[in-house]
Image (tube, rainbow, N blue to C red):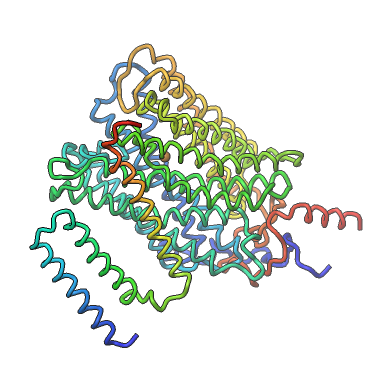
Amino acid sequence: MSSLTSNDARFVEPEGARNYITHDYGALSWLLTKDHKRIAILYLISITALFMLGGFFAVVMRIELLTPEGDLLTSDTYNKFFTLHGIVMIFFFLIPSIPAVLGNFLLPLMLGAKDLAFPKINLLSWYLYIIAAVMGLYIIITGGVDTGWTFYTPFSTQYSNTHVFGVTFAAFIVGFSSILTGLNFLVTIHRMRAPGLTWFRLPLFVWAMYATSIVQLLATPVLAITLVMLMFERVVHVGIFDPALGGDPLLFQHMFWFYSHPAVYIMILPAMGVASEVVAAFTRKKIFGYSFVAYSSLAIAFLGFLVWAHHMFVAGISVYSAMIFSFLSYFVAVPSAIKVFNWTATLYRGSVALLTPMLYILGFIGLFTIGGVTGLFLAAIGLDVHVTDTYFVVAHFHYIMVGGAVMAYMAGLHYWWPKITGRMYPEWWARLAALLIFAGFNLTFFPQFILGYLGMPRRYHAYAPEFQVLNVMSTAGASVLAVGYALPLCYLIWSLWYGRPAGPNPWGAVGLEWTTSSPPPMENFHETPVVTWDAYDYPAMLKAMGETQNV
Amino acid sequence: MPLWIYFAVFAALTAGTLLTWWVSTIDLGMLNTPIALFIATTKAVLVILFFMHVIHSPRLTWVVIIASFLWLGVLFVLTFADYLTRTWKIY
Ligand SMILES: [Cu+2]
C-alpha cells in the first residue's frame, strides 16, 4: 500500500534524536526562543504559577466563609481577595490557558507547519504577559485593589483608594498579549496549512481556535479603550463616566461587557475544541456532524457579541433594551447545544475508553450543560432580578469557567502531555485526581446555587447564620478541589523523569500532531506532510488495522 | 502611490482640522455634534484609504476592515438601544 495514512510512521524520528527540548540548553535558549513549542512551555509554567496564586485567594475566602461572622479577614481585605482572585484567574489564567499553552503547542503541529506565522510576535506576547503579571504581583504586594474584577465606575474612578490605575494598566497590557496571540493564530490558520489540508479537513480544535482568535482580535481592543478611559478619568477627571461632568457610569458597563461577555467565549470555545478532539480519540469515531460543530464555533463567536447587557438588567438600562438582550441571549444557547448534542451522539455506540482525558471531558460536558442552562435562567429578566449579585451567579459562572474551561484544559493537558513531554502520566493517579476534581467541584459550587436562590448576596465576608450549613459544604468541597488540583502538579512533574516513554502515538489517535515523534523535533516534521484524509478518520484507520491483522 | 497624493491627503486633513475649529465657533444647535463627527469620519476614511494603503489592498484586507466596522456598529447600535429608549414609559 503506497498511499499515506494518518498514522503513517514515516515522519517519526529515530530513537535518541534531538527534540525541541534537547535542541538547545541554558536559560537564554528558552527566554529568547522563537519556537512555538518552547513558548507554550513558558506559558505553561507562568499560568500554573498564577493559577496557584488565584487559588490561594480562593482558599482563604472559602475559609473565611466557613463561619457567618467575618472573623478571618476584614471586609476591606475580603474585597481585595475576591477582586484579585477574579483578576488573576480570568486575565492571567483562563484567557491564556488553552490558547497560549495548548494552542501554541499544537496549532502548527495540527496544520503540518514548522511554526506560527509570526514567531517573534509570539515571544512578544509572552513577554507582555510577564510584564503585566509582574505589575500585578507588585500591586498585590503593595496593597492590592478592591473594585472587583469588573472595575465598575464610579467606585473605580472616584471612590476606591487602592491601586486601580496600576491594575487596570496591567489588564490593558495583558490584553495586548491576547490580541497578538489571536492575530498570530488567524494568520497561521489562513496561510500555513499543509498541502491538502483544506478547511473542512481541519481538526475541530483548529476551528475552535480560529473562532477564539476572532473574538480576541475584535473584543479585546474595546477592553483596552475602556480601561484607558477609566485611567484617564481617574487621573485627569474628564467626564466620561462621571454624571457630574456629563458622563454616564453605565457607559463603562456597556463597554466593559462588550469585551467581557465574549471573553467567556475566549475561555470556552477552546475548551469545546479540546472536547471534540478527546471525544473522537476515545470513542474511535468521527465527530457526529463535523461541519455543524465547526460552524457552531463561528456562530458562538458572532452571537457572543450581541448579548452583553444581560449583565446589566438591574443596573438601570431601559426595559426595552433589556428585553432585546434577554431575547438575544437565548440565541447563544443554540450553537452551544448543537455541540453538546453532537458530542453525545458521537459517544453513542462508540467504543468509549474511560481514560483520564475522557473522564475530564465527560465531566466537562455535564458541568458545562448545567452552567449553560443556569445561564438561561439568568438571561430571563424576571428571574435575573431575583438572583442578580447572589451566589447563584457565582455558581453559574464557575460551572462555565471551572466546570467547563478548566476541566477541558486538564483534559487537553493530559491528552497531549505525552506529545509535549514524551512521557506518559501515571493513569491511576490521574483518574483519581479527575474524580476528586469532579466531586470537589460539585460539592463546592452546587450548594452555591441554592445559597443564591435563597438570597445570599455575593462579595460579602459575613452572612446570615442560616446559610452556614451550605457554606460549610462549599468550603469542604473547595478543600477536595484543592487536593484534586495539587495531585496533577505532583504526578505530572514526577512523570517528566519517571513516566513511561510515550512513543509518537500512545492513544492511537489520528491527526497530524500524532504523526511526528514525542517530543517533536525542533522543526516539527522532517518533511512537510501531505494530507489526503479527513479529520477523525477513525473508521478508515480501524479498517486498515483490521486488514493488516488479517494478513 | 505617487507622492503628491500623500501631500494632497495631508492638505485635506489639515483643512478638515481647521474646518472643525471654524465650525466650533458657530452655534448650529442640534447640528453641532453631527457636523463635527462628519468631518472627523471623513478624515478617518482618508487616513485609512491612503495613509494605510487600503485602497490598493487585496480583498481580504477589505473584509477585515469592513468586519471591524460592522462590529463597531454592533457596539453602537445595541448601546443606543439602551440610551434612546430610557425615557419610554409604556411597554
Ligand atoms: Cu454574559
Q: Position of residue A176 (x, y in %)?
A: 35, 57
Q: Where is residue A278 in the image (x, y as percent from the top left)?
A: 64, 46
Residue at 10%, 58% in the rendered image: B27
Determine whether, in the image, residue A386 is placed left or right of residue A407: left
Determine whether, in the image, residue A51 is placed left or right of residue A84: right
Quadrant where the N terminus of chain A is found in the figure: bottom right
- Nearest the eye: A292 or A421: A292
Which quarter is ligand 1 in? top left
Determine whether, in the image, residue A509 is placed left or right of residue A220: right
Residue at 37%, 28% in the rendered image: A388
- Nearest the eye: A322 or A299: A322
Residue at 36%, 77% in the rendered image: B53
- Nearest the eye: B52 or A157: B52
Q: Where is residue A26 in the image (x, y as percent from the top left)?
A: 44, 63
Residue A28 shows in the view? no
Determine whether, in the image, residue A496 is placed left or right of residue A69: right
